[in-house]
Image (cartoon, rainbow, N blue to C red):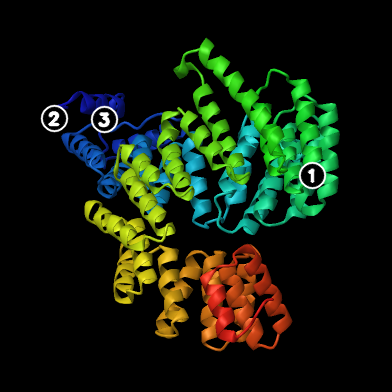
Amino acid sequence: MKCSSPLLFALCVSMFSGWPALAHSATEEGKQVEQTELIRLRAGELPAVTLTSDILFRVLSAEIGATRGYYDMAGQTLLQLATETSDPRLAKRAFQFSMADRNMARALRAAREWALLSPKDPEAVASSLALAASSGETTGLAGALWERIDKAEDKEQAIAQASAIVGKMPDKELALEVLEKALHPSVLSLPVSHLALADAAWAASDPYRALEEADKALALAPDMEPAALRVLEYGMKVDPDRAIDGAREYLQQHPEARKLPLVLVNRLVERNDFDGALALVGQMRNNAPEDFDLLYTEAEVNIRAQRYDQAKALLEEYISVQTQRRQSLRDDATSAVADSSDARLLLVQIAEKQNKPHDAIAQLDKIDDPSLQFQAQVHKAVLQARLGDLGRAQATIDTLRPSDDHQRSVLALTLASIYREAGRTDRAVEILLQADKDIPDTTEIKYDLAMLYERQGRMDEFEKLMKRVIELDPDNANAYNSLGYTYADQNRNLDEAQDLLERALDLDPDNPYILDSVGWYLYRTGDLEAAIEYLERSYKQMPSADVAAHLGEVLWVTDRRDEAVDVWRQGHEQEPDNETLVKTLKRLGVSLK
């Protein structure tokens, strides 16, 4: 049987080169051959098997099938061949195809066959152990990992591989136990052992043990930056002040460190210690004056600190540096174009925070990174609409030439949103109806169109379209939430609302919009204490006027009226014309004056 293409010819050569023409037999001589084959396999040699036309045909059929996406057939065929021929190459290929097919059970069988046939191949053994771990099969795993570590010439690499293998176990506490047993006392003098234990403890939600192991690693290797990083990161959960002081001490002794100071800057910003973060960035700039990326970092910190003038000056300096890079090097030889565009996006962000939309538009027009220009012009149209110039916004959208259906849907959704915010709901509906015809079964378009129907009071069309969204995208939490909330708000179909909101909550349990809907549903069904719990959780994450209206109403009817008024006042300060809040106060006869 001949290979009929260069691709298949290459496959023939790679797969079958070295196959001798020696067949197995059932005779005594055959048994001796089999024993010899076992010895050869253990020595890392390939088996002696006759390359028959049947074997060649089955291998080629599997490979051709895989190129067409039939990984199931390919994996089964090659795994069977691997057991028949004892060739580890076929087992490896069966493993690869089974992984592509996401058939973990067969992938594990193939990996074990591969490791059995090629026990000296570290990739084969690691694949077998990792799949066993991810499947929760841990019997003997610690012993197998220790055997690999003990025999390895590079102990650190073997420990790192063991850490990666146990990291695939679904039970993280058990993973830590397995790793503890696999790391015998003889390797605990290696810092990497304690780093591995620290990471496993962290994954098992034990920050105290994670910090303890990270401290041990740093004590064994005081110059090791990865250990210092873990002491900082894990220590922030245990004793943040100690963790920060320890990182500062390390940096005094190792001013050349790069990753640790950047992480420390982020942690200081999270604690609103902007002066400390800026002082640290200043030290980094003194130590590495040629590192102009630190200008960008310093600008980001200033933005978080709302020191916008300082941030703008730094970003303009950064853009100037990138412009010089572009002038001295070809655009394809530098990241200057992308870096300058990223800086301009930050300037856009600053302009919007300072309520200077014209400045933001000017920056958007200067963005010349091809990958960002579409996004920039869409944002420009939104800003033009906010300025009340719908004509310019429409013209900006019309000048864009979308390259695919995704960009076409973005344009339709953006334009519809512009007209909706301008109070022209009918025009927004027209845009999305046309888009729905042009790009059918796009769930984002159908979802927004359904929400417009709801705003217009066209409830039958809203329900029909939202159910179609759920049919097309069964994991769309927003669709379940929108339909469930609407039923709850209208105090109808409450059983169906419960099912919809439970599904939404399963998909996105911390979403404040969903928490608000669940709270409102519970209010409708009379479970007031549970309603308050969910609404307070929502309001903590998203203190909007809509949630304030709901939470305030439940507090009001449970005779916690002072609290209700406080919540309503907070919502009114944020959005005095909010329709939900205004209607709630009017219905309950409450004045905030």
- What's the CA distance linking mark 1 and mark 3? 74 Å
> Residue 545, position in %: x, y?
59, 68
Q: Amino acid at mark 1?
A: Asp
Give the quadrant of residue 23: top left
Identify which amino acid the numbered label 2 is placed on: Met
Image height of 213 relative to 497, above or below: above
Front one among 386 and 477: 386
Residue 103 on image: x %, y %? 37, 53
Q: Where does the C terminus fall, quadrant-wise?
A: bottom right
Which of the two marks, 1 or 2, is nearer to us in this view? Answer: 1
Q: Residue at x 66, y 56 (%)?
A: 204
Q: Residues within 10 Å of mark 1 (few under 14, many from 20)?
A: some
Please give the residue where the numbered disc 2 appears in the rendered image: 1
For the N terminus, give its image quadrant.
top left
Do we see residue 485 in this rendering?
Answer: yes
Measured in 3D between alpha carbons, the distance from the residue under mark 1 to the one under mark 2, in whole angstroms, is 73 Å
**What secondary structure is found at the residue carrying circle 1?**
loop
Q: Which residue is mark 1?
A: 273
Secondary element type, mark 3? loop
Q: Is residue 181 visible?
A: no
| Mark toward the start of the polypeptide (1 vs 3) | 3
Task: Look at label 3 and name its amino acid.
Answer: Leu
